[in-house]
Amino acid sequence: MDTTQSRLWHERAEAVILGGVNSPSRAFKAVGGGYPIVMAKGQGSHFIDVDGNDYIDYLAAYGPLINGHAHPTVIQALQEAALDGILYGTPTPSEVEFAEILRTAIPDLERIRFVNSGTEAVMTTIRVARGVTERNKLIKFEGCYHGHSDAMLVAAGSGPSSIGVPDSAGIPQSTAADVITVPFNDISALEKALLIHGNEVAAVLVEPIVGNFGMVAPESETYLQSVIDLAHRSGALVIFDEVITAFRFHYGSAAELYGVHPDLFAMGKIIGGGLPIGAYGGRREIMEKVAPLGPVYQAGTMAGNPASMKTGIACLSVLRDNSVYERMNRLGAKLEQGILESAQRAGLPVTINRIGGAFTVYFTNQKVTQYQHAKASDGKLFAAMFRGLLARGVFIAPSKYEAWFVSTAHNDADIEKTLAAVEDTFQEMKS
Ligand code: PLP
């Protein structure tokens, strides 16, 4: 496969854009380096690079593109939005309509605010929780990514009683000192952390189904309820980061799948239909602490912009037909089974965590329920799979910690072609 044009574009990019990418995960650093593939256009389940190579896309732009590229309903909404002028800086009907749609789908969103990214959504829920509880500390879970706000880039301490250390330069130690990180799927670690710090904790922040050390579901049906009960017992609020999970597995929240009710939700990705978006919301009495009704400040020039509102409405209108989730689940299951069979034939250690159309291929024989298990997945084998698939026209995220996302645009022919590429790649890796 000739990717000369990608290389040339990347060289040009490096001269003006820091590192040649606008988000570090787009670089191929985690899969052995080299230049990233530069894409020119997308259509349905495929995209085409600047050399004209065609790929089946499982990146889905890291999640938002649940309906694939250039879905006609979404594109029509975007065209209509553009013709009406793209930004007013005033309230608009579309933001009201979209908020109504979200609240109908997720009734716990008694009041909503739109922002521009998942980072902003999470960051603001934290401020709200701190404002409401008048406490500063946060508990989050090891290996989970919640955007790039200061507090969210704090890594784990060495145990449940230890405080965090900055995971990025430029984060004050004082910020890190307020963040406690515990392992996911380990209720006793959370219990211990709350025993020690409970009366200082403003919020426990959790992805109800983890998407950032691969896809990892709660091990027990009661885990999330226990997280909520423990947090509430300490007087802390519970924030669900549903930036990846909202509308991913069914038309609604992941919280609903487990019958649980967090105090606040942060969302993004899918709900924008591919345009920049974030949203947060939750219980009315909590949300009423936000300006202009309350003392917690949050604002945004682009927040609730009509284009994102209209593409979001359009995207969810496609998902409303729940059969699309059955289809993504069926195609996901077919991929899972085929990949496992190919791995077995090649003698490769593969474990797959799949929830509906989203799954992660780990190169380990161990069950993956915590970050430590995902870390143990063999990065060299992952990089070899990534390169082998790329060369065969299958594009997955360039990191062992990301998921493959099946969209409503994928079909059986895509899956069969993908499985043939996996078989050839695994056979090549064996030799
Ligand atoms: N929360 C989760 C769970 C995410 O996966 C991400 C991004 O990948 C974010 C928050 C941050 O969202 P954004 O990249 O839109 O700022």
Image (cartoon, rainbow, N blue to C red):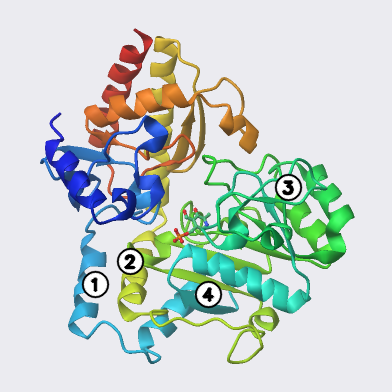
How far separated are the C-alphas under marks 3 and 2? 33 Å
Quadrant (top left/top right/bottom left/bottom right) for the N terminus: top left
Horizontal side, residue 393 vs residue 130: left or right: left
State yes or no: discs 2 and 1 in contact (Cβ < 8 Å): yes
In the rendered image, which quarter is residue 127 located in? Answer: bottom right
Mark 3 or mark 4: whose residue is earlier in sequence: 4
* Closer to us: 331 or 28: 28
Q: Where is residue 341 in the image (x, y as percent from the top left)?
A: 41, 18
How far separated are the C-alphas under marks 1 and 4? 22 Å
The kind of residue on which mark 3 rests is Tyr
**Element class at badge 3:** helix
Mark 1 or mark 4: whose residue is earlier in sequence: 1
Mark 2 or mark 1: whose residue is earlier in sequence: 1
Labelled disc at residue 223: 3
How far separated are the C-alphas under marks 3 and 1? 40 Å
Mark 3 or mark 1: whose residue is earlier in sequence: 1
* Closer to us: 19 or 246: 19
